[in-house]
Image (cartoon, grey):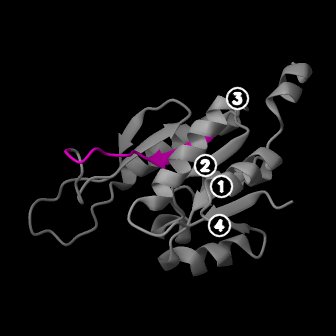
Amino acid sequence: MMRLASVSATGRGATDQLLSAVVERLQAEGVRLGGALRRQETQSEASNCNSDLWLLPDGPIVRITQNLGAGSTACRMDAGALEEAVGTATARLVAGNVDLIVLNKFGVSEAEGRGFHALIVEALSRNVPVLTGVSDAHRAAFEHFAGGMATALSPDESEVLAWCLTVVKPAASRIEEA
């Protein structure tokens, strides 16, 4: 079975909501998670200018965008904050307490070999499966990166959860090994 999978749901924030629901269920199953999800904002917090990542499994929340002021057309990505988030997620993986990496998206940074690109490679080299959101805009870059070695999942919570539980070692067998 392939240890890299992508999912894409239709509608603004739909993939983030899907992955958040799957993560909640995986945590209830005892799956040790790493990676990052986009923080689900309430209506009063919502802003097109802010992007916060929740580092799995238990935080912190890291703001990866910067306020450049009204009228700015430059990239709002805070590369330093993103790399700090990547470093924290990678350290958790290397510590060996991760069964599955879940990432909110494979985007521009990853397509260019930055962002969570190195975490994905490191996880796969350690035989830790990776689930990531991929938008239509970045699908071709993801497919190039994956080289035919990824499973495309439908945006169905049960299907995504089933794939995750199939590729991770069950919690009971981890306890027996300890």
Residue 99 position within the rendered picture, expressed as x and y whole percent measured from the top left:
73, 38
Distance between mark 2 and mark 1 Cα atoms: 5 Å
Sooner in the amino-acid sequence: mark 2 or mark 1: 2
Distance between mark 1 and mark 3 Cα atoms: 17 Å
User: What label does residue 175 carry, if any?
Assistant: none
Sooner in the amino-acid sequence: mark 3 or mark 2: 3
Image height check: is 157 above or below 148?
above
Q: Where does the magenta region start and end?
A: 33-44
Residue sitting at 27 percent across and 53 percent down?
50
Tell me the crowding category of disc 4: few under 14, some 14 to 19, or many 20 or more residues within 10 angstroms, Cα based. Answer: few
Distance between mark 3 and mark 2 Cα atoms: 15 Å
Residue 31 position within the rendered picture, expressed as x and y whole percent measured from the top left:
70, 34
User: What label does residue 154 carry, if any?
Assistant: 4
Q: Disc 1 on helix, strand or loop?
A: strand
Instruction: Name the residue type under label 3.
Output: Gly
Callouts 3 and 2 close, C-beta under 8 Å: no
Residue for badge 1: 131
